[in-house]
Amino acid sequence: MSTYPKPENSRREVNKAGLVLVNNAASDLEKDLALSIINNWRASHNFPLNTFQKRLRRVANEINQESLIAQRIKRLASIKYKLERFPDMNMAQIQDIGGCRAIMKNVEEVDFLVDIYKNASSGIKHKLSKEQDYILNPKKSGYRGIHLIYKYRSDKMKLYDDMRIEIQVRTLMQHAWATAVETVGTFIKQSLKSSQGEADWLRFFALMSSAIAIEEGKPIVPETPDDINELKKQIKLLSDKLGVEGHLTTFRDSIEVLSGSKVVKNAHYYLLELDPSEGTVRIKAYSQTQLATASSDYITLEKRIANGNRDAVLVSADSIEALKLAFPNYYLDTDLFLEQLRKITTEGQLKLF
């Protein structure tokens, strides 16, 4: 327990640091102090996050032992973007600084898992503060999945009380779609997952999400055709126009996975750095007792790459192999999405897989 950072600042101080983060007029000294406060606030989420991740893993594995579980602390760039996008939001109110994800085989497994969490008799003592069902109500962008936002509660570790942890639950195909969106967005330098970027790419992914929704027997994305033939026609037209298969294949093939250091035996945390221009992913592994070092290295790396096209994230997974499956956008692995695209554009009708 002593290996986990503890919050050293009040929420008022955390909120002030968030204001400095998005203030371009702030001095370097003010920014350094703000980053120190924010990094401690982020790192402090690891204790409640690990608590949620362990339970999520146990429950998901009881449903399907092949389910994929991973956790991550929100990137500094993503925190800054969210605060800029929502000026009325305070730093301490961000609901997904600590997040864990369960990737299930199909929507039946997703529904089963979510029902367990929402059942009052399931034994969870933390407070469910918000549910966002983007499977029943898909975002206009095409994003689909279920988010459960909890406030951590503990009888013994009250200093972490009310820290927000987000649980994401999605199917393997919903995950493949989200991966493809992030991959293309990374290379064309547009935030497609935030509905910002080229109209054709945004439309293509919305259409593809509806096609996947039809296969899963769930509601389609708003403002997309409910006629299957028309949906397939529009997908094929945009896929050909954008050269989607060629782009994603090139992106995937350009990556050479590099290890920043020898993999630590029984590694628990991984710091990933993606460099699209060089076509590389660098990985640095840490044992469970090295969380403080990992957090420090994380913020140092974020400072170094702040003005470039590189990307970084600190995540937790059982192994390098599980990491690659749970965070494929950092390896630009889009094979499953491409397989689905080929099915849609070549087969006579959509079929349940």
Image: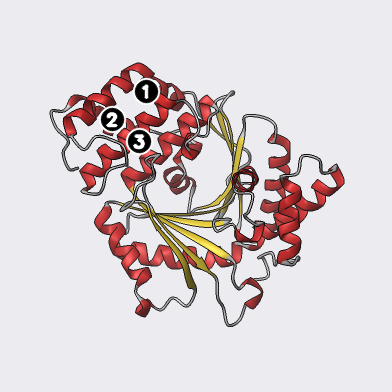
What kind of element bears circle 2?
helix
- Do the numbered discs 1 and 2 sit on residues whose CB atoms are within 8 Å? yes
Q: Which of pointers 1 and 2 lies earlier in the amino acid sequence?
A: 1
How many residues crowd mark 2 within 10 Å: few (<14), some (14–19), many (20+)?
many
Q: Return the residue at label 3.
A: 206
What is the three-letter code of the residue carrying label 3?
Answer: Ala
* Residue pictured at 33% horizontal, 63% vertical: 113
Q: Which of pointers 1 and 3 lies earlier in the amino acid sequence?
A: 3
Q: Which of pointers 2 and 3 lies earlier in the amino acid sequence?
A: 3
What is the three-letter code of the residue carrying label 1?
Answer: Val
Q: Is residue 290 visible?
A: no
Q: Is residue 181 visible?
A: yes
Q: Residue 307, how many percent across, how many down? A: 70, 32
Q: Return the residue at label 1.
A: 244
Q: Is residue 51 above or below residue 167?
A: below
Horizontally, residue 224 falls left or right of residue 148, namely left
Q: Is residue 265 above or below residue 56?
A: above
* Residue pictured at 75% horizontal, 54% vertical: 17
Of circles 1 and 3, which is in front?
3
State how far apart marks 1 and 2 are (Cα): 9 Å
Q: Nearer the viewer, residue 43 or 191?
A: 191
Q: Return the residue at label 2.
A: 341
What is the three-letter code of the residue carrying label 2?
Answer: Leu
Q: Residue 44, how many percent across, how many down? A: 66, 63
* Residue pictured at 32% horizontal, 51% vertical: 135
State how far apart marks 1 and 3 are (Cα): 14 Å
Q: Residue 170, how many percent across, how many down? A: 36, 52
Q: According to the image, what is the colour scheme of the structure? A: secondary structure
What kind of element bears circle 1?
helix
State how far apart marks 2 and 3 are (Cα): 13 Å
Q: Is residue 125 above or below residue 262?
A: below
Q: Quadrant of the N terminus?
A: bottom right
